[in-house]
Amino acid sequence: MRAMVLLQSGSPLIARELEPRALDPDEVAITVEACGVCRTDLHVLDGELPNPKLPLVLGHEIVGRVRTVGERVGSRFSIGARVGVPWLGWTCGVCSHCRAGRENLCDTATARFTGYSIDGGYAAETIADARYVFPMPAGDAAELAPLLCAGLIGYRALRAAGDPRRLGLYGFGAAAHIVAQVARFEGREVLAFTRPGDHEAQTFARRHGATWAGGSDERSPDELDAAIVFAPSGALVPLALASVRKGGVVVCGGIHMSDLPSFPYALLWGERSVRSVANLTRRDGDELLALAPRIPIVTHVARRPLSEANEALADLRHGRLQGAAVLVPDAA
Ligand SMILES: [Zn+2]
Ligand SMILES: [Zn+2]
């Protein structure tokens, strides 16, 4: 089975033939049709997230077809069914977080994450625990893939933002272009803050529902009820706070961010809050995947063959993408 494998943090992925392993009773084997490239993959590659499984197959926005099922999977998935595999690969079910409906916070020492502590989807095939796999709506596999992390984290961040009438999005990449569509569907106004001078990204944002787009160094033309920071730059947090009204919230959507600079307490005062979202729950997935065809969410994807995974990661790293990069199997 063909895969792009990370052997060591900081080094490029290497093409390898891997021997498929035997299925556990709760697992499904999946033929990968598409796998999105997420910024978290870069954080894993660069060693910014501790102790990845090595060697590792990255990728946690997997869309594919069920090839075989383990003996306990039962009738939940039939052979050939279209499924999606997200970042959340397995949780303990018994810790205080899991029991409180926050399986996304299950201890990282026990929880398993796709493409980090277990192998993911930069491969022709993958294996996942069926209890964490989503049935997927119909559609193009590559266009569905970004829903599984960019979409899910964006959706969780939007829910964490409360009920904003006017929402600011800092960093307008894969997650923001999806969450903007959800927010507009819910009747919210969306303002986009991109790298200063990035007119291409600002045009892209306006095309995906932003009523205003400008540089992240600009003060919002109208006070925001909430802001979500998707770009991995801590410096954006005080900038966002400066544009959020009293009582508003700034939600940080990334798994890794540069340090937050110190800032005057006045920016936080007035019952403003700063919070993060971490991972996802299966409920987030069920909700977003039910909502997606109703909006309908249209994702903007740049396809690359699996063998060009390193190039796709470089495009993301250097901001050369609009929307999401997605790997598809190489033509035979
Ligand atoms: Zn747990
Ligand atoms: Zn991700």
Image (cartoon, grey):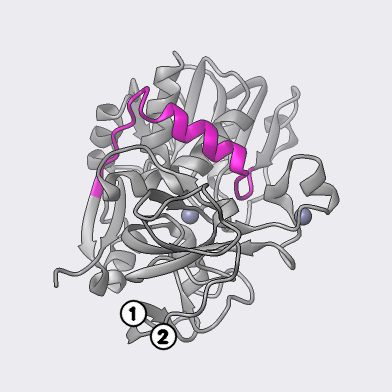
Instruction: Based on the picture, tell me whether residue 269 belongs to the magenta stretch.
Output: no
Residue 221 in view, yes or no: no
Residue nearer the viewer, 167 or 21: 21
CB of mark 2 within 8 Å of CB of mark 1? yes
Q: Which residue is at a point 32% across and 50% down the rendered structure image?
A: 324
Per the rendering, the mark at residue 19 is 2
x, y percent for residue 90: 64, 59
Give the CA separation, mark 2 to mark 1: 6 Å
**For the N terminus, which image quadrant?**
bottom left
User: Looking at the image, is 136 positioned above or below residue 268?
Assistant: below
| Residue bounds of the magenta highlight | 277-301
User: Can you give x and y, in whole percent of width and height, for residue 178 in the image?
Assistant: 38, 35
Residue 57 percent location from the top left of the image? 44, 74
* Picture quarter with the C terminus: bottom left
Where 246 sits versus 279, above or below?
above
**Callout 1: few (<14), some (14-19), or many (20+) C-alpha neighbours within 10 Å?**
few
**Identity of the residue drawn at 22% across and 41% down:** 200
Residue 24 relative to residue 202: left or right: right
Q: Which mark is residue 222?
A: none
**Which quadrant does ligand 1 occupy?**
bottom right
Residue type of the residue flagged with mark 2: Glu
Q: Which residue is mark 1?
A: 1
